[in-house]
Amino acid sequence: MIYITRKEHFNAAHKLYNTNWSEEKNLAVFGPCANANWHGHNFDLYVTVKGKPDPETGFVMNYKDLSKLVRDSIIERVDHKNLNLDVDFLQGKLPSCETLIYEFWQLLAPVIPRVAPNCQLHALKLFETHNNYAEYFGE
Ligand code: NI
C-alpha cells in the first residue's frame, strides 16, 4: 500500500462563538477567534489517499485528478467564504478546525473511489495556523 498526499489551500473567515455562553466565557475559551466582526485564516489542507500503484501509470492516483476532486468537493465551497454564514454544510455548526475536517471527510471519502477505484481516502490534515492543525482518519 502506497500513500500519496496533495496539499490544497484556501482562505476563509469565521467566528467561534457559543451562543449559550456569556461574552466573557466565549472570549476566555475562543480568544481572538470569538471576535464579533469575524477574522480570517489561511488554511492548508493535506489530503492523503492510499492504494496500489496502477501498473500502466505507476500512480496510486493521478495528482491532477486528486487536486480536481478536492477543489470541486471542498475548496470551491469554502474559499473566500464566511464559514459561519456562507457554507451550506456548516450551517448550525461551530466552524473549528475539528468540525471542518470532519465535514470535509464526509464530502471527499465517497468520491475518491469513483475516480480512482483502487484508492481510498486515508487522512486529512488541516492547518489553521502554522502552529495548529487537526488530523482525521475517518474513525
Ligand atoms: Ni479563528
Image (spheres, grey):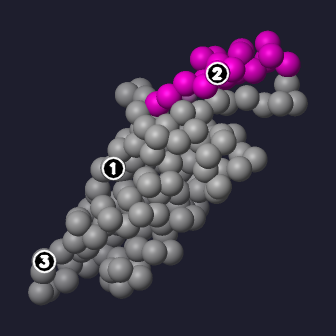
Q: How much space separates mark 2 and mark 3, taking CA atoms?
A: 49 Å
Q: SS of the residue at dot 1?
A: strand
Extent of the magenta region:
22-41
* Residue 86: mark: none
| Secondary structure of the residue carrying numbered label 3 | loop
* Most foreground residue, 69 or 87: 87
Q: Position of residue 37 (x, y in %)?
A: 64, 21
Among numbered discs 3 and 1, the one appearing first in the sequence: 1
From the image, state whether disc 3 or disc 1 is nearer to you. 1
Above or below 58: residue 36 = above
Residue assigned mark 2: 37
Q: Nearer the viewer, residue 53 or 95?
A: 95
CA separation in Å, label 3 and label 1:
23 Å
Q: Amino acid at mark 3?
A: Gly
22 vs 11: above or below: above
Identify the residue at image location x=67%, y=30%.
16
Q: Look at the image and say whether residue 38 sits in the magenta stretch.
A: yes
Query: Mark 1 = which residue?
Result: 8
The earlier-in-sequence mark between 1 and 2 is: 1
Which mark is in front, 1 or 2?
Answer: 2
Instruction: Identify the residue shown where x is 33% and y is 69%.
Output: 50
Mark 3 neighbour density, 10 Å: few (under 14) some (14–19) many (20 or more): few
**Main SS type for the magenta part?**
helix
Question: How busy is the neighbourhood of tag 1: few (under 14 within 10 Å), some, or many (20 plus)?
Answer: some
